[in-house]
Image (cartoon, rainbow, N blue to C red):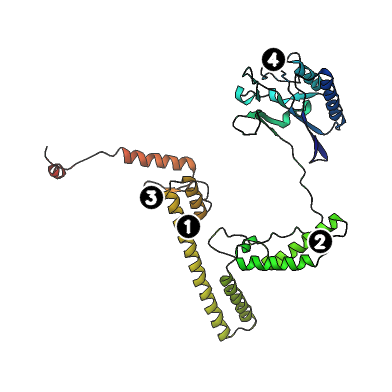
């Protein structure tokens, strides 16, 4: 199976996934597989990147002197006949077996255990072109991944930059719907009834599947967009931009402000002042309510000893803290120290005077001590 990905810079990456015959298969089946794989590898354009991966049922060992550039010195086990065929194929097309390039523990190299002998082997590989070896950050097996198979999952991290898909110019992506309104039984019933009426009157038997799907999709989206509306963003601070009451007050205040600017009278100024006061009171109530919710949330995290959520909530409350050092006053209080070395010297001087302060106890305090 092959997959072509478009990369940045007008280049492609061809990914080949294969499953090689086992050792018990006849030689003609193995030769046929290698011929097909050879054609697929050879058909990929030379400037493009290529990744060949899968279960090759082969052991390649770590004979770096013989197969220089094909394998590394961190292989596992010995080489078998399937491994020899794979190495010849890689040498023919200037490919490198990335599993053998990284110095890792044996548990991150092996991928399959032989059932009778209980010996672990490396038979699953990720292979790239030798020119792209520097693009491979690591290739290793995952010990704890549950893949529903007797093989371990092989993961390879590559520095491939995939070209993001471009949207057609002039067309905006459809807005996401506010599906949270469907939790309301009345709204859900209204949407279902409206969709039933529109879909019954819409013919979907034109013979063109693409056109029928486009008509169906547009009808459902337009109906839901009218009844549900677009999705609103949830506020991250104390000001809730989705609060309808605050929106109405702000709209009224802005209207009175424009009226006062165009026709400045005593009555308009008084009405604007009264609207500002009402907005400030409501915003203060909103902020107090948000702070109370945050305080209860932080207290819950502290009571449950969830330090991660606790510090996240505290950072949300206080916001990003400025980096840098705070200035200090000198010992006599006449000079402000701003440089880093001077601040460190001042702290050292302060703690030296505090920690080395002589302990003096008066005779009166000694007499107050309980007698043994």
Question: Looking at the image, do the residues carrying marks 4 and 2 touch, with CB atoms under 8 Å apart?
Answer: no
The residue where tag 3 is placed is 333
* Badge 2 density bin: few <14, some 14–19, many ≥20, Cα 10 Å: some
Q: Secondary structure at mark 4?
A: loop
Q: CA distance from mark 1 to mark 3?
A: 39 Å
Dot 4 or dot 1, earlier in sequence? 4
The residue where tag 4 is placed is 78
Q: Which mark is residue 215?
A: 2
Q: Nearer the viewer, mark 1 or mark 3?
A: 1
Q: Which mark is residue 114?
A: none
Q: CA distance from mark 1 to mark 2?
A: 46 Å
The residue where tag 1 is placed is 294
User: As rendered, which of 301 and 222 lies closer to the eye?
Assistant: 222
Q: Judge from the rendering whether residue 338 lies leftward or rightward of residue 62; answer left or right.
A: left
Q: Nearer the viewer, mark 2 or mark 3?
A: 2
Q: Residue at x 74, y 62 (%)?
A: 221
Image quarter hosting the C terminus = top left
Dot 2 or dot 3, earlier in sequence? 2
* Badge 3 density bin: few <14, some 14–19, many ≥20, Cα 10 Å: few
Dot 1 or dot 3, earlier in sequence? 1
> Residue 371 falls in which quadrant of the image?
top left
* Badge 4 density bin: few <14, some 14–19, many ≥20, Cα 10 Å: some
């Amino acid at each position: 199976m092959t997959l072509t990905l478009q990369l940045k810079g007008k280049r492609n990456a061809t990914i080949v996934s294969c499953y090689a015959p086992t050792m018990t298969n006849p030689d003609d089946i193995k030769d046929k597989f290698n011929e097909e794989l050879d054609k697929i590898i050879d058909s990929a354009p030379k400037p493009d990147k290529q990744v060949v991966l899968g279960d090759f049922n082969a052991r390649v060992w770590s004979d770096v002197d013989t197969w220089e550039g094909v394998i590394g010195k961190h292989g596992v086990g010995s080489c078998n006949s399937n491994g020899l065929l794979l190495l010849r194929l890689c040498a023919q097309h200037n490919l490198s077996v990335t599993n053998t390039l990284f110095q890792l523990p044996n548990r991150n190299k092996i991928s399959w255990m032989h059932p009778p002998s209980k010996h672990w082997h490396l038979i699953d590989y990720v292979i790239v072109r030798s020119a792209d070896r520097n693009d491979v950050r690591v290739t290793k097996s995952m010990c704890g991944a549950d893949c529903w198979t007797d093989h371990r999952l092989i993961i390879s991290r590559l520095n491939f930059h995939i070209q993001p898909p471009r949207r057609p110019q002039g067309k905006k992506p459809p807005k996401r719907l506010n599906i949270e309104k469907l939790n309301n039984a009345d709204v859900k019933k209204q949407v279902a009834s409206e969709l039933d009426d529109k879909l019954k009157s819409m013919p979907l038997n034109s013979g063109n599947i693409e056109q029928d799907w486009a008509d169906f999709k547009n009808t459902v989206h337009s109906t839901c967009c009218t009844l549900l509306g677009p999705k609103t963003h949830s506020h991250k601070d104390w000001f809730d931009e989705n609060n309808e009451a605050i929106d109405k007050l702000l709209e009224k205040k802005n209207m009175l402000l424009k009226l006062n600017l165009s026709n400045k009278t005593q009555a308009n100024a008084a009405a604007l002042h009264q609207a500002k006061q009402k907005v400030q009171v409501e915003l203060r109530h909103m902020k107090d309510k948000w702070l109370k919710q945050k305080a209860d949330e932080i207290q819950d995290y502290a009571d449950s000893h969830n330090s991660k959520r606790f510090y996240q909530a505290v950072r949300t409350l206080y916001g990003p803290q400025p980096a840098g050092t705070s200035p200090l006053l000198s010992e006599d209080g006449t000079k402000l120290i701003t440089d880093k070395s001077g601040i460190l010297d001042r702290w050292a001087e302060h703690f030296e005077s505090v920690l080395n302060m002589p302990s003096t106890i008066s005779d009166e305090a000694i007499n107050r001590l309980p007698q043994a």
